[in-house]
Image (cartoon, helix red, strand yellow):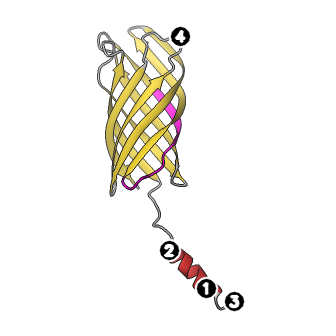
Amino acid sequence: MRSVLPYVAAGILSCATPQARALEAPVFLSGAAPADSWKTGYGGAITSTWFHVLALEGEAARQPLEFGDGSIVSFTGSAVLAPSFGRLTPYGGLGVGLFRQTFGAESDTGTLRCFVLGLKLKLGLLVLKGDYRNYGPPSGALTPLDERLTLGGGISF
């Protein structure tokens, strides 16, 4: 029995699928709604995938106001289901975070929550992604940020 064990272990290891890249670091451009309130924003994220189906993401984003001197900066952590189908990975889940919004001399700091839906295309080390986020804005926000669309790309390692 002991003489067969190394062969069985080698067979199992040779049949295993190659290790998937577990980290992604994309940057993105974003548009927000209501559209008459917000200019094009930008941000970046780092995503860690677990068991080929669960992804945890940390994101920092800045969305400037369309008119006047102001913006919203947010830091969000999200947990999404992200099953991979070849090069495509649809994902969806929930996020929570912190925001700081300024408008001239006024400012507001608080928490946020969001619903996330997106799609990733993996091309070797390159990852292209787009997502939609629906925010549950706090009632005291200076300017509402209801939704955000992002499009970006980065590397997978």
Give the mark nearer the N terminus: 4 vs 1: 1
Q: Nearer the viewer, mark 3 or mark 2?
A: 2
Give the mark nearer the N terminus: 4 vs 3: 3
The amino acid beneath tag 4 is Ser
- Residue under pointer 3: 2
**Distance from the alpha carbon under mark 2 to that under mark 1:** 14 Å
Q: Secondary structure at mark 3?
A: loop
The amino acid beneath tag 3 is Arg
Q: Nearer the viewer, mark 4 or mark 3?
A: 3
Q: Position of residue 18 (x, y in %)?
A: 45, 67
Q: From the viewer's side, name the closer residue of 2 and 61.
A: 2
Q: Is residue 14 above or below residue 134?
A: below
**Distance from the alpha carbon under mark 3 to that under mark 1:** 8 Å
Q: Residue at x 39, y 56 (%)?
A: 86
Q: Secondary structure at mark 2?
A: helix
- Residue under pointer 4: 139
Residue 132 in the figure: left or right of residue 55: left
In the rendered image, the residue lying farthest to the front is 85
- Quarter where residue 37 is shown: top left
